[in-house]
Amino acid sequence: MKRRAYRDQQYWGRPVPSFGDPKARLLIVGLAPAAHGANRTGRMFTGDSSGDLLYRVLHNTGFASQPTSRLRDDGLKLHDAYITASAHCAPPDNKPSTEELNTCREFLTRELALMPEAKVVVALGRIAFENYLRAAGLKPGGYEFGHGVEHHLENGKTLICSYHPSRQNTSTGRLTEAMLEAIFTRARQIVSRR
């Protein structure tokens, strides 16, 4: 259902494609398109509060050309970064079902195969963390999730865990801008030395 604020806008309303530099050394894995964000605009993390925070932090750490993203064609470019999601369609109540995640995982697995230069993966939330590990052929049970926890994986990649930049996490103080910026500052340090 459209929100009143967007009633005059045409919603994308289809699977939202990944976004960024396909030769990137940084891969960001999110949850799923927000109903009135990416599902409306057609670009990952665009047009909602999660994206407002994420793109500001990516700009501050040199991964994005501008600090804001409101529309798919607003000129935003990612530098050495690529954003994908565990599910590419907006799920009911913003919670993808196991079936949706299993169906979409094949696309993530293919993306991983097409991105050999990706050396650092930032998983935004536990679902993205577990889904990335499964797509990479690893068992999630062997890895701890926690904000700022870093894993050096058998596939040669560094996996950095972060809480998702959702309003639920930011309004409660579970995730602050400084905490998220520290994650991407660390990612920048790692990709810069490889």
Image (cartoon, rainbow, N blue to C red):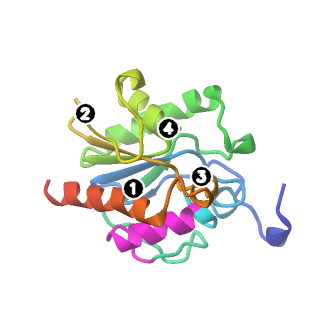
Image location (x, y in percent) of residue 123: 42, 45
User: Is 57 one of the magenta-colored residues?
Assistant: yes
Q: How many neighbours does mark 2 have within 10 angstroms: few (below 14), some (14-19), or many (20 or more)?
A: few
Image location (x, y in percent) of residue 44: 55, 57
- Under mark 2, the amino acid is Leu
Q: CA distance from mark 2 to mark 4?
A: 17 Å
Look at the image and give the residue range highlighted in magenta.
50-66
The image quadrant of residue 57 is bottom left
* Residue highlighted by disc 2: 153
User: Is 171 one of the magenta-colored residues?
Assistant: no
Q: CA distance from mark 1 to mark 4?
A: 19 Å
Q: How many neighbours does mark 3 have within 10 angstroms: few (below 14), some (14-19), or many (20 or more)?
A: many
Q: Is residue 186 shown above or below 88?
A: below
Q: Nearer the viewer, residue 86 or 165?
A: 165
* Residue highlighted by disc 3: 16
Q: Is residue 134 shown above or below 80?
A: above
* Of pointers 1 and 4, the one earlier in the residue sequence: 1
* Residue highlighted by disc 4: 126
